[in-house]
Amino acid sequence: MSVPSLAPFIAKRKWLQAWVKPLATWYTNAAGYRQLGLRADDLIPEENDVVQLALKRLPPKDAYDRVFRLRRAFQCSVSHQLLPKEEWTKPEEDAPYLTVVINEIQAEMKEREDLEAIIVSKREKNTKEGH
C-alpha cells in the first residue's frame, strides 16, 4: 500500500503548490466519486489482507457509514443517476479514515518483521589471565 509520493516535495514549494492545487481539485471533481456520496478512502480495493484487517479495526460508526455510502453509490450507479447536489461529499468531509488505520497496520507489520529478524547472540565473557 506504500507508494512513493510527490506531496511532501510539492508542499515545500509554494509556487509549485499554487500550480498543482487547481489541477488536483479539478481531477478530484472529475473523478466523480463525490457526486455519488463516496469518500476517497471508500475507493481503496478490499482484496488486500492489510485492508481487510483495517476494515475490521474501524470503529462501528465508521464501518456502518462506509457500508451505507457504498450501498447508496451502488444504487445510484444501477439507476444511472447522481445524488442531489446537497448530498454530494464536500471536500472538508473527504478526510482519510481508512488510510490512517492502514498506515498503523503497516507500521506494526514492519516492526514485527524487524523484531523477527533480530539475531540474538550470547556475549562471551572477557577472560583475562589471573582472574
Image: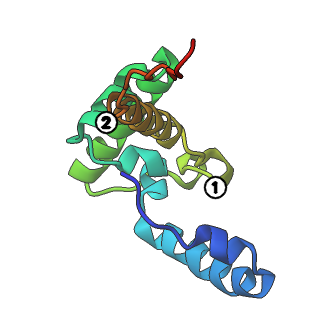
- Secondary structure found at label 1: helix
Q: Position of residue 117 (x, y in %)?
A: 33, 34
Location of mark 1 (residue)? 91
View extreme (right): residue: 14
| Mark 1 or mark 2, earlier in chain | 2
Q: Quadrant of the C terminus?
A: top right
Q: Is residue 48 visible?
A: yes
Nearer to us: label 1 or label 2:
2
Whole-Å distance between the Cαs marked 1 and 2? Answer: 26 Å
Residue 68's image quarter? top left
**Which colour scheme appears in the figure?**
rainbow
Q: Is residue 13 above or below residue 105?
A: below
Query: Which residue is rendered at x = 47% and y = 57% of the image?
Result: 35
Of residue 48 and residue 28, the one placed in the foreground of this image is 48
- Secondary structure found at label 2: helix
View extreme (top): residue: 131
Location of mark 2 (residue)? 50
Q: Position of residue 72 (x, y in %)?
A: 36, 38
| Disc number for residue 104 | none
Of residue 56 and residue 94, the one placed in the foreground of this image is 56
Q: Is residue 29 above or below residue 92?
A: below
Q: Amino acid at mark 2?
A: Val
Q: Position of residue 100 (x, y in %)?
A: 53, 39
Residue 111's image quarter? top left
Query: Which residue is rendered at x = 32% and y = 37% of the image?
Result: 51
Q: Amino acid at mark 1?
A: Pro
